[in-house]
Image (spheres, rainbow, N blue to C red):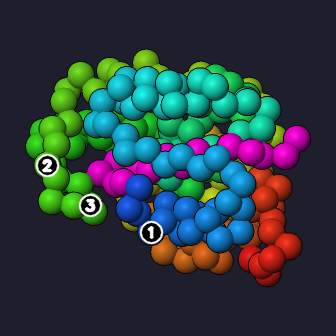
Amino acid sequence: MAITHLLYLHGFRSSPQSSKARRMAAWVQQHRSDLHWWCPQLPPSPKEAIALIDVGIAAWPSDKMAVIGSSLGGFYATVVAERIGCKAVLLNPAVEPARDLAQHIGETTAWHSDDHFFFKPEFIAELRALKPRTITRPERYFAVIAKGDELLDWREMSARYVACRMKLLDAGDHALSDFDMHLPDVLRFLGLESPLTSE
């Protein structure tokens, strides 16, 4: 089934202004302007973030949509894919965000602006409540995982998505600064290759 709707979910402290989100948005605009593209600014509260996503995609056709998620957005993308059964691309996805983000409780700043926000203690429980128990249909997932990720353990990511299609990079970084090199694989998995580009 051809993809008609594409959702992009950014990571913790990130935004739709992240390099990968902007790269995907530019590709869609240039090559597949027929796609319904949405990359929302997610609130700090995981519960509110998923509620925002749920409302935003409520009318989307589950068999014709896909989600791309980076870091914490990869965790959210897994939640979405498990709930509605769509394809998901995960870019260095967070596996245990409740554990990892416990050290970030308090006031923090966004990467792409001067905005400050407060990551509350109750958000940890919200993350725990959201975590899917299992990956029910591994064929729906494609994970790009960098062994050079300085924030997340590639072994943990690989173990979580072991049965899924995976591109394991020998080096790389958490931001996937070489995302352009992996974009063709992402597009191929989603069935979004454009005849107008060699990407």
* Residue, disc 1: 19
Q: Please, what is the three-letter code of the amino acid marked with disc 2? A: His
Q: In this view, does 155 lie above or below 23?
A: above
Using the image, tell me which numbered label, if any, was put on residue 116: 2
Query: x, y percentage for residue 9?
Result: 49, 46
- Mark closest to the chain's N terminus, 3 or 1: 1
Q: What element carries label 2?
A: strand
In the image, is residue 18 above or below residue 181? above
* Residue nearest the viewer, comparing 37 with 131: 37
| Mark number displayed over residue 121 | none
Is residue 64 on the magenta stretch? no
In the rendered image, residue 14 lying in the magenta stretch gets the answer yes
Q: Residues within 10 Å of mark 2 (few under 14, many from 20)?
A: few
Seen from the viewer's position, the closer of residues 19 and 181 is: 19
Residue at mark 2 to residue at mark 3: CA–CA distance: 10 Å
What residue is disc 3 on? 111
Marks 3 and 1, how far apart at CA: 11 Å
Mark 1 and mark 2 lie on one chain; the one further toward the N terminus is 1
Give me the residue at 68% from left, 25% from top: 84
44 sits left or right of 20 in the view: left
Q: Give the range drawn in magenta.
A: 1-15
- Image quadrant assignment for residue 192: bottom right
Q: Which amino acid does label 1 sit on?
A: Ser
**Residue at the (56%, 39%) spot, across then down:** 77
